[in-house]
Image: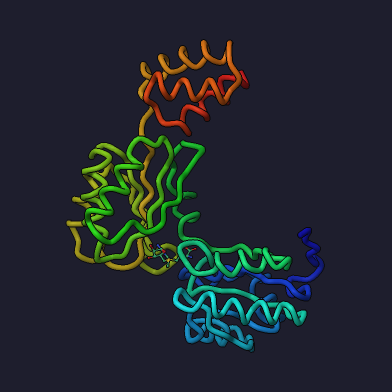
Amino acid sequence: MNTAVAHDSPSAVARATLYVVATPIGNLADFTLRARGILQSVDTVAAEDTRVTRRLLEHYGIRARLISLHEHNEQRAADEVLQLLAGGAAVALVSDAGTPGIADPGARLAARAHAAGYTVCPVPGASAAIAAVSASGFLSPHFLFYGFLPARAAARREALAALATLPYTLVFYEAPHRVAACVDDLIAALGEARRVLIARELTKLFEQTHRCTLAQAAAWLAADKHREKGEFVLVVQGAPLDASATADVDKTLNALLAQLPLKQAVALAVEITGGNRNALYERALALKKR
Ligand code: SAM
C-alpha cells in the first residue's frame, strides 16, 4: 500500500495507520520530537512493557491508552491492534528501548498490518546497533546485524562458524553475564586478530566505546569488573579479503563474466573457488561495473 504521511506537524497522525516508534536507549534527549508528538496523538500505544512505557510517557506529560504487546502475546495482541486499525484508529508500537522489531517484538505485528493493507509508518530514532556501527570506524560498506547469538555454547559456536568467512562487519547484542564468554567464542571462531568495537552503555552515564583486537578485548574486559556490567553491542570486523586470493578470484570471475551472464558466472566461480556465494556475487557485480 502506498503511504500518505502528513509532514506538516510532528504530531500529525493518519487514521488506520500503525506507527513503529523508536524510543531512547538511555539518554532521554534522544527521544525525537516527532516520536513524542505521535505517541501523544495516536489512539492507542502497544508497548512491550506498559510499566516501562508509562514511566517514559509520564516524564513527558504524555497521556496515552496503553496495551501490552510482547514476545509471548504478540499474535493475540496483534489481533487487537488489527481490530483497532479496522475501526480507523491510529496505533503506535513501542518497545522498552530503541527501535521495535530490532531484536525486539514488532515484526509479526508489522507483517500482519501490511498483509491486511494498513499503512505501517516507521518513526526512526535510537537503535543500539546503528549507534555502535556508526562509531566503529570499520571501513566495510556492509554490515550484518546478527543480534543475540544463541545462549547455548554449542549452538553459539555453530552460528559463529557460519559467519567466520563473511567479509562483512558483524554486529552482536550480548547480555552482560555472557559478554566475556562471547568474546572467547569469537576468538575461537574468527581468530584473535580481528578488531572489535565494544560499545557499552551507549548514550548513558558510563558509556564506553573501546576498539581493539579480539585478544585485547578479552583482556580489557577482565581488567575491570565494572566493564562486564551494563548493555553491550559488539561490532566485529569482517573477514579479511586476502590480496593474492582476491587477485585469483578476480581473474576467474573476469574470465567467466566475459563468456557468461552474471548469475551463471557466479555459480561457476563458487564451484571453482569454493568461495562464499554472496561475496563472489558482490565482487562480480563490482567487476562488471568496471
Ligand atoms: N530494539 C533495541 C534497539 O533498537 O537497539 C534493542 C533491544 S534488545 C532486547 C536489547 C539489547 O540491545 C541489549 O541487550 C544490548 O545488547 C543492546 N542495547 C540496548 N541498549 C543499549 C545501550 N544503551 N548500549 C549498548 N547496548 C545496548
Q: Is residue 158 left or right of residue 118?
A: left
User: Which quarter is ligand 1 in?
Assistant: bottom left
Q: Is residue 14 left or right of residue 276?
A: right
Image position, residue 278 (x, y; %):
48, 34
Residue at 45% across, 63% down = 103
- Indicate the quadrant where residue 77 lies: bottom right
- Indicate the quadrant where residue 290 lies: top right
Image position, residue 89 (x, y; %):
74, 80
Residue at 27% across, 54% down = 155
Image position, residue 33 (x, y; %):
66, 71
Q: Is residue 236 left or right of residue 3?
A: left
Question: Relative to the observer, which residue lies in front, 198 or 158?
Answer: 158
The answer to whether residue 30 of the structure is visible from this angle is no
The answer to whether residue 102 of the structure is visible from this angle is yes
Question: Relative to the observer, which residue lies in front, 126 or 122?
Answer: 122
Residue at 72% across, 81% down = 41
